[in-house]
Amino acid sequence: MVDVMDVRRAEERYRGGDPAAGISSLHAFSFGPHYDPDNLRFGAVIACNEEALAPGAGFDEHPHSHTEIVTWVVEGELTHRDSAGHESVVRPGDVQRLSSAGGVRHVERNDGSEPLVFVQMWLAPLEPGGDPSYEIVRGIADSTPYAVPEAGAMLHVRRLTAGERTAVPDAPFVYVHCVRGEVRLDGEELGPGDAARITESKDLEALAGSPAELLLWEMTVG
C-alpha cells in the first residue's frame, strides 16, 4: 500500500556528461545546466546520477559542500581521491560515502582498463556545516542497511533472484532505483535505470521477474 508512487523511466533522465571525454551521465533530478523547479529533490535525495566512464576518463578535482555523497559501483573500478587525504578504489559491492560537510574537493577517475559504471546519489544533510568525513564499506552484505544519519536516511541494497520478493521499507519517503534486472512494484514494472518515488510506503513488496539489483532509500524527512 502506498499513498503516492511516482515512477520515472530511464529514458526520461536528463543526459549530461562529456561524451568526447569518455563521460556519459544520466540525471534523475535537476542537475547542472538542466533545471526543473518541479524536480529538485525527493525526500533527502537531491541527485541520482548514472555515470559511465571510459578507461582513463574521469572528473578532475572539484568541490562539494553540504552534501552526503553515496556511490555504488555497477561494473569496473572507481578511483577516489579527496582533499582530506583519502584515496581508495571502489569496486562492485562496496558502498562509498563522502560527507562533504563544510567543504571538500575530490577526484573521481577510471584508472582501470575496463569501462566503469556507477550510480552516485546525493542527499541533503539535516544540518549544514561540520567537518568532512569519508567511509567505505567493502562488500556490503545483502539486506544490510547502511545508515546516513546526517540525512535521516538508510540505504538498503537488495540483490534478488528471479521470483524472489523483498519488502520495501515502511517510511514517509522511499526512493527505489533499479540498477539491473526487472521487478514488479505495486503493479508497475521497473527495468534498469527506472526509479520509483514512494510517499508513505506501507506493507509493500518488490517481486523480481529476473535476477535484479535494487537500491532503496528509506527516509524520514522530505
Image: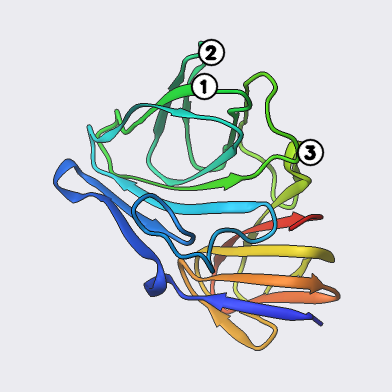
How many other residues sit within 10 Å of disc 2, few (<14), some (14-19) or many (≥20)?
A: some
Label 3 to label 1, Cα distance in Å?
Answer: 19 Å
- Which of the two discs, 3 and 1, sits closer to the camera? 1
Residue found at the far front of this picture: 37
Give, as a three-letter code, the residue at label 3.
Pro
Give, as a three-letter code, the residue at label 1.
Val
**Looking at the image, how many numbered discs can be counted on the residues?**
3
Label 2 sits on residue: 84
How many other residues sit within 10 Å of disc 3, few (<14), some (14-19) or many (≥20)?
A: few
Label 1 to label 2, Cα distance in Å?
Answer: 7 Å
Label 3 sits on residue: 149
- Marks 3/2 in contact by CB < 8 Å: the verdict is no
Label 1 sits on residue: 104
Question: What residue is shown at x 56% (from left), y 42% (from top)?
Answer: 93
First in residue order: circle 3 vs circle 1: 1
Q: Is residue 43 above or below residue 111?
A: below
- Which of the two discs, 1 and 2, sits closer to the camera? 1
How many other residues sit within 10 Å of disc 1, few (<14), some (14-19) or many (≥20)?
A: many
First in residue order: circle 3 vs circle 2: 2
Left or right placement of residue 195 versus residue 144 in this view = left
Q: Is residue 164 above or below residue 186?
A: above
Rendered location of residue 110, percent (x, y): 31, 33
Query: If the image is split into quadrants, where does the C terminus sit?
Result: bottom right
Give, as a three-letter code, the residue at label 2.
Ala
Query: If the image is split into quadrants, where does the N terminus sit?
Result: bottom right
